[in-house]
Image (cartoon, rainbow, N blue to C red):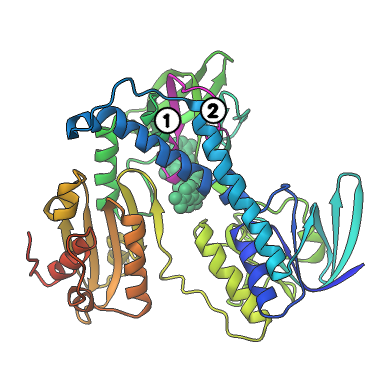
Amino acid sequence: MDNFDLIVIGGGPGGYVCAIRAAQLGLKTACIESRGSLGGTCLNVGCIPSKSLLNLSDNFQKAKNNFNKQGIELEGVKLNIEKMMLNKNKSVQVLTKGVEFLFKKNKVTYIKGKGVIFSKNDIVVYENNGKQNYKTKNIVIATGSEAVSLPGLQIDEKNIISSTGALSLSKVPKKLAVIGGGYIGLEMGSVWSRLGSDVTVIEYLDYITPGMDREISSEFKKILTKQGLKFKMGFKVNFVKNNNSSVLINCTNIKESKEENLEFDKVLVAVGRKAYTEGLNLGKIGINKDKKGRIEVNERLETSVKNIYAIGDVIKGPMLAHKAEEEGIAVAEILAGQSGHVNYDVIPGVIYTSPEVATVGKTEEQLKEESRSYKVGKFPFLANSRAKVNNETEGFVKILADSKTDKVLGVHIIGPHCGDMIAEMALAMEFGASAEDIARTCHAHPTHTEAIKEAALAVDKRPIHF
Ligand code: NAI
């Protein structure tokens, strides 16, 4: 029997980061993971493999459609999907092994198997047919989330796939339906569309990416439509029939109450994710969950049972790897007697399409709902010299600032490289910057980041280049 200061259940970005930080702070720490490799959904079947395919498919699309026009003459550009998948798998393997190395370096004990909580100090880990007991002073639950399906819809990862299946298709489907116009649907829809699939996104609402600033989401839809993605907005999926050689979707146009039958080769179900807590024994030990099945925590991320904490997708908040990481660090620091804290007002979100979409802070809709008085500054990439020379002029930067204090309340960008650019805005907001602070910060020329400076100038109606 081993005694630990902390056992983390789940080796995803929340769990492994928490374990490393706790070990750095001198806690005797273990991390239990049942998947067989560390890194959770993000590294194994989420963020990392999808970004690999997004990058590779973007290169393919550019080589096929853009390079010739730009004086780089290529002939016979061909897709080798097997090689592309191998490249993706290699990236995943290197990174998951990297986490194992970090565990060794930081002296975190890596326990393979499925952890079950028996009391606030006892965990049993089941692996194959064996089981092992562990004692611990503290527990962090970081078991993440799983894909949601629709009622009566069976995901077989062959014809009806989740994001996991969409990351490892061995052939480009001729016709792919994507149910759900959110993060996963649009990223994976983009990948397969670039590789040659005829992609139709079926979305229940009449706008994509709910929760995002509406002006951005409407520009995003326009750009994706231009790229060849088709959208059926305001459609309710009634049932999906798997005919093995094809899949039939029966759906209703909500406004017109009109039913349609559509046929596809494959259907990707991307209608959200839910907290994963199966088999943890939460009910028996008295850990409360909310109506959505998420573990309830207080501001210290502690559950209803003392010394048991929860972080990441398994609790409320955006299901994002970096949010989970921040919570992991906060809990580790709280356990070490420090004042760990997460600023939920400044959690960036990025969609890694081409162009990217990046956002941090409040949307215009949220500010209206809160009856806050705000100013808007916008700047299009069409007027940014770097974007212009790179032939990447779609999109714009939008900064929302308080009318009276000029404090930045939200930044929303659609455009080239904005997934990286949003870090500047997150930092500015952490420091409580005003739009004027950003406008007066020297930005290198020629860079895409000048569009941020110009949008900040536009908050005060004085942009230079537009
Ligand atoms: P999501 O919540 O982003 O989008 C789901 C979409 O499905 C919504 O637009 C919703 O209106 C629609 N929908 C729900 N029920 C429907 C129905 N019956 N018929 C048609 N449409 C329906 O969920 P998604 O894309 O599955 O992603 C899950 C989570 O993973 C998200 O919380 C996201 O934050 C995270 N994620 C983040 C990524 C990133 O940071 N780049 C990439 C991929 C996922």
Compared across the picture, whether 116 is left or right of 256 comes to right
Provide the secondary structure element on which disc 1 rests.
Answer: helix
Q: Which residue is mark 2?
A: 169
Which class describes the residues within 10 Å of circle 2: few (<14), some (14-19), or many (20+)?
some
As for residue 106 lying within the magenta part, the answer is: no
Say the numbered circle drawn on residue 192: 1
Seen from the viewer's position, the closer of residues 386 and 219 is: 386
Amino acid type, residue under disc 2 in the picture: Leu
Give the percent coordinates (x, y) of residue 351: 39, 49
Residue 376 is at least partly visible in this image = no
Q: Is residue 364 above or below residue 204?
A: below
Seen from the viewer's position, the closer of residues 5 and 320 is: 5
Provide the secondary structure element on which disc 2 rests.
Answer: loop
Mark 1 near ligand 1 (CB under 8 Å)?
Answer: no
Query: Which stretch appears magenta?
Result: 165-188
Discs 1, 2 touching: Cβ within 8 Å: yes
